[in-house]
């Protein structure tokens, strides 16, 4: 059911790789809520993914951009404003990748070149997106910029490895750029800290199934789905959240404030 929450708004959505991607669901909900937007991903992901299907469904143009390349980002913002017919109201940064995690490198044996890549792709790219938007004066006043984070920014989850550092930096960038963009342009910047979700990036983390099951049982409402994340995100692109900025917003079924839950106690009793 649509509420026309984003009627007349223009956006850029990064990170839709396939139907499981959180960005894919955000695009579907944003479209249903009346937004027009461009879709973007790294050129290699565009070749591997099925984004054309989503673009057709949402009547959206695809503009390739490696989010670590300022040149690509300049082209993306300039073309998006041309295609959409004006400045941008919302941006979703839904990007994460760690070569150390992907290649199974132990945390005590990190490849530091890969660590730099993790930080550049998963965190610094967020700064690059916002700095480019500011320099091109591409954002409308009261615009909204969102990135996706994970609670490993605050608590240790060993298999998350160097992605934990990327998420801590991502949330820090949201606060610092949020202060700047609010002052300059009344643009808000936030992160959503999402439950474990069965996507390509998610399932790439070692022991993901156990992790997913544990989080589900530790969350009174259960793990939040990608669909629910998309709805929450779209609310933050809407005018109903104009005064929320520089926040890390927990979207986790209650995980982050639970000590223990009945479902976990039942499991532990079975083991004893
Ligand atoms: P996904 O694998 O569908 O999306 C990750 C996206 O990042 C892909 O579309 C990929 O092509 C893109 N990407 C990688 N390198 C890029 C680059 N250089 N330039 C542009 N795009 C690039 O997985 P998912 O889960 O939808 O991930 C989206 C975001 O949600 C990520 O930030 C992830 O860390 C975050 N997140 C995911 C959780 C999960 O359990 N799946 C939990 C909490 C947060």
Image: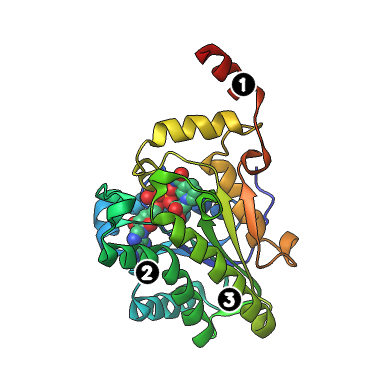
Quarter holding residue 222: top right
Q: Residue at x 65, y 85 (%)?
A: 184
Please name the residue that numbered disc 2 is placed on: 120
Q: Which residue is drawn at 42% across and 70% down?
A: 125
Relative depth, front residue between 104 and 185: 104
Question: Residue 145 location, x and y as percent?
Answer: 57, 67
Question: Residue 24 location, x and y as percent?
Answer: 45, 50
- Residue 265's disc number: 1
Residues marked 2 and 3 touching at CB (< 8 Å):
no
Looking at the image, can residue 272 be seen?
yes
Q: Label 2, label 3: how many angstroms apart (C-alpha)? A: 16 Å
Q: Which comes before the other along the chain, label 2 or label 1?
A: 2
Check the image and report above or below for 122 versus 268.
below
Looking at the image, can residue 41 be seen?
no
Please name the residue that numbered disc 3 is placed on: 177
Q: Label 2, label 1: how many angstroms apart (C-alpha)? A: 40 Å
- Mark 2 against mark 1, which lies toward the viewer? 1
Q: Which comes before the other along the chain, label 2 or label 3?
A: 2
Question: Is disc 1 surrounded by few (<14), some (14 to 19) or many (20+) residues within 10 Å?
Answer: few
Mark 3 lies on a secondary structure that is: helix
Q: Which residue is drawn at 41% across and 32% down?
A: 209
* Residue 247 placement, left or right of 198: right
Q: Which comes before the other along the chain, label 1 or label 3?
A: 3
Q: Does the residue labelled 2 lie within 8 Å of ligand 1?
A: yes
Q: Residue at x 29, y 57 (%)?
A: 110
Say which quadrant the N terminus sits in.
top right
* Residue 200 placement, left or right of 60: left
Relative depth, front residue between 187 and 217: 217
């Amino acid at each position: 059911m649509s509420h026309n929450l984003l009627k007349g708004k223009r956006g850029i959505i990064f990170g839709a790789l396939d139907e499981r991607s959180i960005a894919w669901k955000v695009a579907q909900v944003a479209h249903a809520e009346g937004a027009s937007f461009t879709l973007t991903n790294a050129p290699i992901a565009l070749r591997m993914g099925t984004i054309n299907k989503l673009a057709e469904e949402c009547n959206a143009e695809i503009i390739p951009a490696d989010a670590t390349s300022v040149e690509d980002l300049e082209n993306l913002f300039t073309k998006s404003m041309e295609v959409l017919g004006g400045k941008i109201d919302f941006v979703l940064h839904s990007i994460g990748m760690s070569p150390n995690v992907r290649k199974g490198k132990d945390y005590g044996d990190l490849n530091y070149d890969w660590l730099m890549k993790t930080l550049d792709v998963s965190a610094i790219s967020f700064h690059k997106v916002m700095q480019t938007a500011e320099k091109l004066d591409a954002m409308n006043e009261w615009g909204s910029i969102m990135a996706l984070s994970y609670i490993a920014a605050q608590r240790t989850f060993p298999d998350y490895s160097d992605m934990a550092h990327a998420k801590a930096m991502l949330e820090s960038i949201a606060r610092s750029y949020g202060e700047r963009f609010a002052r300059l342009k009344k643009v808000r910047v936030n992160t959503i800290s999402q439950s474990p979700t069965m996507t390509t990036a998610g399932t790439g983390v070692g022991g993901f199934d156990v992790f997913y099951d544990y989080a589900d049982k530790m969350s009174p409402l259960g793990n939040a789905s990608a669909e629910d994340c998309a709805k929450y995100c779209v609310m933050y692109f809407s005018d109903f959240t104009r005064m929320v900025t520089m926040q890390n917003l927990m979207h986790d079924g209650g995980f982050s404030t639970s000590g223990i839950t009945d479902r976990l106690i039942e499991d532990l009793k079975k083991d004893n």
